[in-house]
Structures are given as structure tokens and as C-alpha cells.
Image (cartoon, helix red, strand yellow):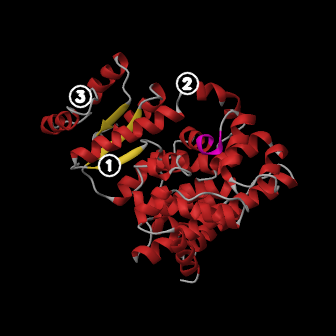
Amino acid sequence: MIDRDPAVLRSFERTFETSGCTTFLASSTHEAMAILASRRIDILFADVLTEPGGMAFLIDIREKFPDTVRVVLSAINDRNHLAKIAASGTAELCLLKPWIPAELVAVAKRLLAVYSKIRDKKLTATLSGFRSSTVMPDLYRRISAAIANDRPASEIASMMAEQPDVAARVLSLANRSLYGAEIGTVLGAIVYLGLDIVKNIVLAAELFSSGSNKSVAVAIRKISDHAECVCATTAGLHRVMFGKSVSPAHATAGLFLDMGRLMLLNVAGNVYSDYVTGDSIVDTKHLVQIEEKNFGVGNPVAGAVVLDWWQMPAQFSEAVLNRFSPDSAGLIPQNVMAILHIADAHAWRVIDKMKSEISPGALATLGISEVDVSNLIETACHD
């Protein structure tokens, strides 16, 4: 933990003293760097963003110690400030002070569970050949760099306007599938949703706009339809069940549940497109088994790994990793993860014509039955 306030450091140490975790405390980035250089640090909690060079320090940590998970723990509860952190890839997670001890320990353990899996050395070796063919989309890469360099929103909007097809797709996703908003311009989307959300939608828009040949393009269109169905169903279910809109960050997670299928499609081309567009696979369990047999990894794990490669927030990697096992999630609120899971199961059935079991735990979290699910989705679709 890095913090200039000794009282905060003592509080952090007390929080973890019975957790089974070993803590190291630093009052400056210089002290922290010395600890990182001499010890294996799994998670770095840091409140350094009010210090000169704080953002640069965290980016430096990302480059020098890529296995260390970076968590910003800040007292600054400002939407624009936090959005910039999330959008820049400076940290995998942003949390606010003051913290609740039990919750902070739970978050730390959940981060360890997620990243120990997707950064596993054996898995990394299995996917090493995939990384060179899984290239970060150009506009997303440029926007990420602009945000990291603190460029103004107007400049980022101009960059997006250079690619009208992507800009149109961003507005379509924002207005129709995610938020039901009436946003007319890219700059309006940035102001309304925030840079972090818009950057994530740009990534989805670019991924869903590509295709090396006709069969791959058809498969991408189907995956895109699946993602939009998940987002729209999640938004509708949340409104019907809780009487309010799902948060933009959580709504956007639905766009990336199929990141693994996009990755495998990019790697295997026509071979994998047959899995997407054909009718030989009847349920998602069978699909994952085939993926693991032929590629060494199933789409949930593959997707979570790609999001980590591209410095996406921890909540997204966790949501993708646990798309079929939502009870294991903890970084996204349980009720939101349960709705995402149900919306995903609905999309598998409606778009892909595959059976996908709904977790009993997700139903229990929401206090509903499978019969209720059908009624709620029907209501949400007509809401």
C-alpha cells in the first residue's frame, strides 16, 4: 500500500492482519519501487494520483512489473477523475476511501483469484502464439494513448469522426443497446457517458466491424447480434426488476462477454466460424469442450486474457471469465452479474440457437425462478 498518511497505512495493515495476506507499506513511490524490486507483490494499492507523476508511476509499474495488479484507492470521488484512470489503463481497478475492511479483503482475494488464473504461466504459454494475431484495434489504441496523454475530449471526438462507420456504430450502441439515450454526436457521448465508457464502446465497434472474408464476417455479425442482445436484455431486466437503469460501466460489460469467441475466430478463421454459424453445437458446455480440445482454451478464459492484454478494467475480465459461473464473481455486484448471466443465456438461445443453463445461484441472488425469467424478459422487451 502506498499512501503519504501514516494513519491510512496503519488502517490498511489492520484490515489485512487476519486475512492470511502479507502487507508491505510505503509512504512514497520511491519506497514502493524499492519494495517491488525486492519482493513479489501480487496487488499494489496506491493513492498516488494527487502527487506529481502519480499516473506515470503506475504506468511505469505496469511496464516493469506486469504481473502486479494495480488498484487505485483514492479519496477523490470525482467521476471525470475516476473515468480518466479507468480509460487510461493506469490501474485494473479504482476504489474509494474510506473502505470497509471486510469488503476490501474480499476484493483483494477476488483479484487474486481472477488474475492468478488469466496470468497463469502455463496458460500464457498456450496462448503465446495467439497474441501476435490478436492485435489491438487502431482507433482504440490511438484513443487509449490520447487519454493517457491527457488530450482534450474534443480532440478524441475528432479522432473518432475520422472513421464515420465506427462513430456511427458507437452512437448506435450507446443509443439503442446500452442506455436508450438520445445522443446525437460523438462529443455528446463523451460528455454524457465519460471517456472510459466511450473508449470501451469504440473497442466493441471496431471488433464488430471487421471480417477477413465472407464467412468470418457473417460469424462476427452473429457475435455482434449476441452482444447487443445481452446489453439490451440486461438494461431491460434491470429497469423492470429494480426500477432504474443499470450503471453505464456495468451495461458495457455485456459487449465483451464474447471477446473469447472473437479472439478464436480471429485465430482460426473459417474453422471457428463454422462453430458460430453452424448448427452442429447444441449447447454452450459442448462449445467450450470443443474449444478446449482444439485450441487449448475455452472462450471465457480466452476472452478474459485478451481484455487483460488490452488493459481493460478488472470487472470486465471477471465478467467474461465467469459468464457461465456468475456465483464466482465479486468485483461486479452480484445482482448485476446475475442479470448479465441471464441475459447472456437468453442471447445464446435466441441468437445462437444453443442451450445455455441458467445458474441456480443467479436465480437465488435475484429471488426468481426460471419461469419468472421468461416473463421478466418478455416484460423488459416491451418496456
| 211 lies left or right of 263 | right
Quarter of the image that includes the N terminus: top left
Q: Nearer the viewer, residue 289 or 273?
A: 289
Q: Position of residue 145 (x, y in %)?
A: 54, 44
Q: Please say if 168 is above or below 61.
A: below
Question: In the drawing, does residue 294 fall left or right of residue 233?
Answer: right
* In magenta stretch: residue 299: yes
Outermost residue on the left side: it is: 7
Work out which residue is located at the far right of the displayed protein and give it.
214
Give coordinates of residue 68: x percent, y percent: 42, 30
* Identity, as a three-letter code, of the amino acid under mark 1: Leu
The disc placed on residue 95 is 1
- The residues colored magenta run 298-302
Look at the numbered disc 2 and give the secondary structure of its residue. Answer: helix
Residue 25 lies in the magenta stretch: no
Q: Give how far apart the Cα atoms at labels 3 and 1 are.
A: 18 Å
Q: Amino acid at mark 2?
A: Lys
Which residue bears the numbered disc 2?
Answer: 121
Q: Dot 1: what SS?
A: strand
Q: How dense is the environment of label 3, judged by Cα within 10 Å: few (below 14), some, or many (20 and up)?
A: some
Q: Earlier in the sequence, mark 2 or mark 3?
A: 3
Closest to the camera, between mark 2 and mark 1, is 2
